[in-house]
Amino acid sequence: GENVEQHPSTLSVQEGDSAVIKCTYSDSASNYFPWYKQELGKGPQLIIDIRSNVGEKKDQRIAVTLNKTAKHFSLHITETQPEDSAVYFCAATNTNAGKSTFGDGTTLTVKP
Amino acid sequence: GAGVSQSPRYKVAKRGQDVALRCDPISGHVSLFWYQQALGQGPEFLTYFQNEAQLDKSGLPSDRFFAERPEGSVSTLKIQRTQQEDSAVYLCASSYAGFQPQHFGDGTRLSIL
């Protein structure tokens, strides 16, 4: 089955700095890669996603890159703000046959 | 409501009791998913419905876990003879079609004493 590894497990940045979270996956059949933000006591909230036919996608301060050959994808947050502090999860999905496999999460802390 | 609704938000049960967790998906969403999230970990897939059909239940940990969606809308996850290792947050997600994008509810935190 699919295996997703996510790094780092914790990340602390100063307000205004950039944050990068990286994930690797094992199943070459995975073709959809969402990123979720989870705040304490809440469910995961989709913040950005990318499909395997695209190498990069950007939405304001958030961007995701995908390298299919190397089987890794990354989340980039620029100009971080304290409200960006949360746990972020990556996931890999084979939309044709499989289920979503999540990484173990990254706790991002943005210091004011 | 506009989002996925789960009830109860918290459930405490004694070991050996049966519990039922409810999920109300977003109206019109065909696909519904259940996940189990242990403390400090990512959600782990349990089962998937397309309308009323349960297409994948490979993630259910044992035959004590049972899920249904009889009318293709509301879903119930039932756990029989609960054990301490069942303690976790149970998340429900729905999507318009297929596997993505998924919209999550806020989960049910289950504690087995």
Image (cartoon, coloured by chain):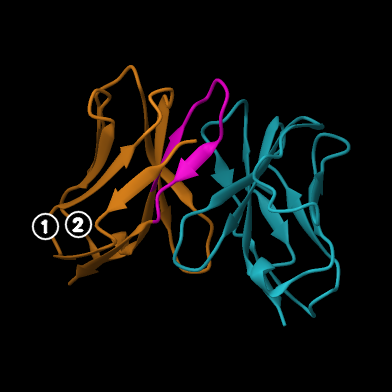
How packed mark 1 is, by other alpha carbons closer than 10 Å (few <14, some 14-19, many 20 or more), is: some
User: Which residue lies at the image location 56% right of the left edge and 43% below the top edge?
Assistant: B103
**Which amino acid, mark 1?**
Asp
User: Which residue lies at the image location 34% right of the left edge and 47% below the top edge?
Assistant: A5
Q: Position of residue A8 (x, y in %)?
A: 24, 57
For the view shown, which residue lies furthest in the top direction? A53
| Viewer-proximal residue among A69 and B104 | A69
| Viewer-proximal residue among B6 and B79 | B79
* Left or right: B6 in relation to A1: right
* Left or right: A48 in relation to B7: left
Question: On the image, which quarter does residue B36 sit in?
Answer: bottom right
Colour displayed for chain A in the image of the structure: orange
Question: Which chain is drawn using cyan?
Answer: B
User: Which residue lies at the image location 15% right of the left edge and 64% below the top edge?
Assistant: A15
| Viewer-proximal residue among B17 and B27 | B17
Tell me if residue A59 can be seen.
no
The answer to the question of whether label 2 and label 1 lie on touching residues, with beta carbons closer than 8 A, is yes
Q: Which mark is residue A17?
A: 1
Segment colored magenta: A90-104
